[in-house]
Amino acid sequence: MNAVFASRTAQADEASPPVLSVRGASKRFGSVLALAGIDISVSRGEILGLLGDNGAGKSTLIKCISGVHRFDSGSIIIDGAITTIRSPGEARFAGIETVYQDLALFDNLTPAQNFFAGREISGPQWLPRGLRFLKQRRMDAETEALLGNLKVTLPKLDAVVAMMSGGQRQAIAVARSTVFARKVVILDEPTAALGLRESRQVLDLVATLRDQGNAVILITHNMEHVIELADRAVVLRQGRKVGELVPTKDNKQELVSMIVGA
Amino acid sequence: MSVRPTTLALLLFFGTTFLFFSLFAPRFATASNMENLMSGFSFLAILAIGQSFPILLRGIDLSIGAIVALAGMVAFDLTLIFHVPGYLVLPAALAAATLAGTLNGALIVYLRLQPFIATLATLAVYRGLVYSISGRQLVRGLSTTPITDRWITDLETYYDLGSAVGLSRFIKFPWFPLSFFVMLALLAVFQSVLITTRFGRDIYAVGGNLEAARLAGINTRRTTIAAYAICGFCAGIAALILVARLTTSTEALGTGMELTAIAAAVIGGVSLSGGVGSVFGPAIGAFLLGVILLGLTLLGVSQFVQQILTGAILLGAIGYDRLLVVRRQRRTAVFLAERA
Ligand SMILES: Nc1ncnc2c1ncn2[C@@H]1O[C@H](COP(=O)(O)OP(=O)(O)OP(=O)(O)O)[C@@H](O)[C@H]1O
Ligand SMILES: [Mg+2]
């Protein structure tokens, strides 16, 4: 395997400093205050559950972290240094991978082409970026090996993803983040509307991401998944952070009432 | 990629049509008719190759006919009014065409215009520009002066490959026009750019899912502008071939060619909904149109009926494309319904 797949060993040390923190984040869309002074942080080898009702501001928060939107005010601190993220490309460069809620896959491309979209293995380096030749066979081989490692089975690797089921597509989207993740992986409702078996597969992938030593931010409406996977949970309501706790079977009810504000 | 079965079907259809006319149209399978096919449709294939780039991005370029006229008139003016030597006229005309294409791309990217609207507007702008810079109007007597610069007129050269390889002793072999080889060269270059380079992959990514491409860190603006620039460049090449053939240029040069080029591209398997196809199919599509039109002419079918048939073929190709898209969308709809 080469550098792309090099996995780090987890250092799930409670005391380890956060790899990513957000301080005082606010964001307004016209008259809608989508985020009002949010603070969150997440460490390596940790899964942070991000909870909240529809429209609470979860997607907005993570889109600001991954460079799609920008905070009106507030700062992003990566490995202790204040970092400006102005575009998705810069977020990736800073080591942040995101699997978006609305499935940022290319229907017309194969799994391997999806995996490497925008960062294809290519050469020679002296050519301008656009004219470098794709090393398609190598990308295919690496994708196949990786999907094998993650036990993701696809019927055909050279078919375009439009032909694949919802679970397979979601597995591809999540698996893609495991290839390139270096620090932080953000997953926005990765199991929404997946069947039981497919959800299981995606949740296992999320655990793999954590075990590789990534800090993971997981957005979901599924309490069971939060309790099973998340080390901590942050609850948003109408753009405000209304609570933070370690989710267990016993405080599930407390968590639910925080979310709905009852 | 899912291009292959479509390309195979296209080649099969091409072969069948060719065979049909060879059997039933008088003088179809003759050397001189093959010369007509190659010289009459190579420039159309070049236009179709260029048009594929915007369509692959889910766009369209309606202005290429006007760009042909613009490049043609630039060549006309520079040669006949300013007596610029041909080896400078050629790059200047190509630069004008490429610039016009780049402007299309820039309008689409920066003003966020629909490609259809943007290029419909520039179609009018470029055509108007052609009239206002036309040396035929500005200088008395130029409209009957032919271009004689060898650099330009030599583009209309034919090669007797049959004699060169000794085939002419057995059959009458067609002479190959230079424009055919220019077309082959452009085809080879752009096909390999599309399939083997990062820029090519970016085109498919942007055409498949613009938002996802942006999120993947692809420079979608630069990719879009480059695609329209390539389209303009190809229109420039086509213009030079036409000017060399006519030894002059007119304000109306290229009128309506955008539709034929779009037809060839769609027949060639480039999906109007973006991200699917290549430039090989459109080149075949252009010659398929050529075979049909030449064949019908030899069968004595009138020009008007031919136009109707061309339209019908285009409709058929678009209908087939829509069918594939709807099928794909139904899958996605089912999937999204599951998620909701
Ligand atoms: N691009 C945008 N333009 C305007 N308003 C927006 C935009 N994106 C989000 N909003 C608004 O910001 C608020 C928060 O939306 P957000 O998408 O972050 O919610 P969410 O917590 O992700 O909800 P869900 O669970 O339904 O995905 C909503 O009121 C929404 O209407
Ligand atoms: Mg959301």
Image (cartoon, helix red, strand yellow):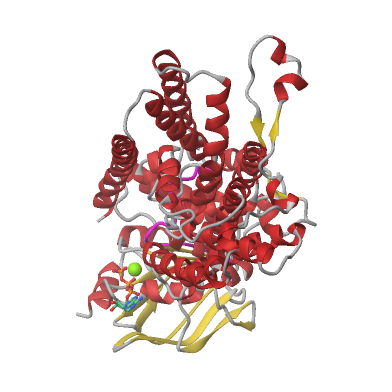
In-front residue for pair B102/B169: B169
Which residue is found at the position 74% from the left and 50% from the top? B150
Look at the image and tell me whether residue B128 can be seen: yes
Q: Is residue B92 magenta?
A: no
Residue reaching furthest to the top = B170
Residue reaching furthest to the front = B141
A189 on left or right of B14: left
Query: Where's residue B263, x and y in %?
Result: 40, 43
A169 on left or right of A251: right
In-front residue for pair B264/B188: B264
Which residue is found at the position 34% from the left and 37% from the top? B303
Query: Where's residue B106, x and y in %?
Result: 52, 71
Quadrant containing the N terminus of chain A in the rendered view = top right
Q: Which residues are magenta?
A: A96-111
Q: Is residue A109 magenta?
A: yes
Query: Where's residue B309, x and y in %?
Result: 31, 35
